[in-house]
Image (cartoon, helix red, strand yellow):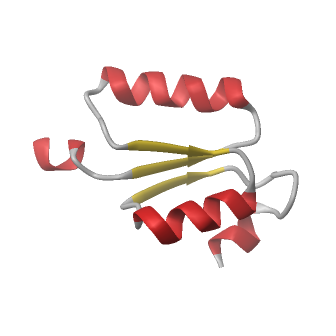
């Protein structure tokens, strides 16, 4: 299970409070490589740069929806 803790996680949500809550939970569980984006285009750009292992993606984003981001 320790190898999971080294995975890169990208959190995508336009509500900063939700991002911070998810990040706090992951940190409490000893995850260290956590990245955050607040809109779809930012998420796409970050995903291209960091190559996350896991993405937690909100569907309702202000610029493009999560389905478009996922594509």
Q: What quarter of the picture does the N terminus occupy?
A: top left
Q: Is residue 2 left or right of residue 25?
A: left
The spot of residue 62 in percent (x, y) is 87, 51
Residue at 43%, 24% in the rendered image: 25
Residue at 29%, 26% in the rendered image: 29
Q: Is residue 37 left or right of residue 66?
A: left
Toward the right, the furthest residue is 62
- Quadrant of residue 42 within the rendered picture: bottom right
The spot of residue 16 in percent (x, y) is 70, 29
Number of numbered discs on residues: 0
- Quadrant of residue 51 within the rendered picture: bottom left
Asked if one can make out residue 1 in the rendered structure from this viewpoint, the answer is no
Residue at 35%, 52% in the rendered image: 8
Residue at 82%, 51% in the rendered image: 60
Asked if one can make out residue 22 in the rendered structure from this viewpoint, the answer is yes
Q: Is residue 56 above or below residue 69?
A: above
Q: What quarter of the picture does the C terminus occupy?
A: bottom right
The spot of residue 6 in percent (x, y) is 22, 47
Q: Is residue 46 left or right of residue 14?
A: left
Toward the left, the furthest residue is 2
Q: Is residue 58 above or below residue 43?
A: above
């Amino acid at each position: 299970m320790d190898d999971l803790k080294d995975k890169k996680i990208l959190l995508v949500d336009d509500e900063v409070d939700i991002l911070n809550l998810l990040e706090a939970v992951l940190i409490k569980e000893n995850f260290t490589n956590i990245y955050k984006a607040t809109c779809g285009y930012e998420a796409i750009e970050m995903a291209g740069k960091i190559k996350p292992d896991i993405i937690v993606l909100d569907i309702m984003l202000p610029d493009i929806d999560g389905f478009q981001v996922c594509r």
